[in-house]
Image (spheres, helix red, strand yellow):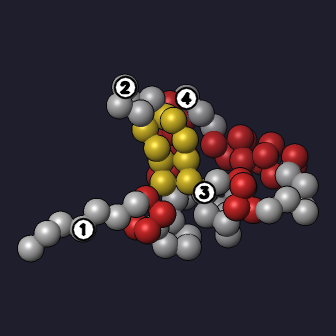
Amino acid sequence: MSKQVKTLEEQLCDEDWALIISKEGNLKGMFIPETCDSKSVPHSIVYITEKYFGVDITEELSEDFEKVDINVNPDILH
């Protein structure tokens, strides 16, 4: 039986989040669901990004949502 490898996007559901961490252990990126707003960040994501990476993700997202043009294609935000 062969093992089938799936891409990150194939493994994620519509409301899933993903942290992308480099081989050095640094926060490299994050997949944010399209249904997200700055108040719907899971507590575990807030805790991990603040404790381990020194990033207040709720503040970052709030700033991003203020800057986003409502006509922007949401696919480019990921």
Q: Nearer the viewer, residue 54 or 10?
A: 10
Q: Nearer the viewer, residue 34 or 45?
A: 34
Residue shown at 51%/35% (left/top)?
A: 28
Which residue in the structure is indicated by mark 3? Answer: 32
Q: Quadrant of the C terminus?
A: bottom right
Q: Label 1 is placed on what type of residue?
A: Gln
Label 1: few (<14), some (14–19) or many (≥20) C-alpha neighbours in 10 Å: few
Q: Say whether disc 2 or disc 4 marks the residue closer to the N-terminus.
A: 2
Q: Label 2 is placed on what type of residue?
A: Glu
Kindly indicate the quadrant of the structure image that contains residue 76.
bottom right
Q: Say whether disc 1 or disc 4 marks the residue closer to the N-terminus.
A: 1
Label 2: few (<14), some (14–19) or many (≥20) C-alpha neighbours in 10 Å: few
Q: Position of residue 67 (x, y in %)?
A: 87, 46
Q: Say whether disc 3 or disc 1 marks the residue closer to the N-terminus.
A: 1
Which of discs 2 and 1 lies nearer the camera? The answer is 1
Q: Secondary structure at mark 3?
A: loop
Residue 60 vertical position relative to residue 10 in the rendered view, above or below: above
Which residue in the structure is indicated by mark 1? Answer: 4
Q: Position of residue 38 (x, y in %)?
A: 72, 55
Q: Secondary structure at mark 2?
A: loop
Q: Label 3 is placed on what type of residue?
A: Ile
Looking at this view, name the residue that lies furthest to the left: 1
Which residue in the structure is indicated by mark 2? Answer: 24
Q: Nearer the viewer, residue 51 or 64?
A: 64
Distance, label 4 to label 3, CA atoms, is: 18 Å
Residue shown at 43%/59% (left/top)?
A: 8
Residue 26 vertical position relative to residue 66 in the rendered view, above or below: above
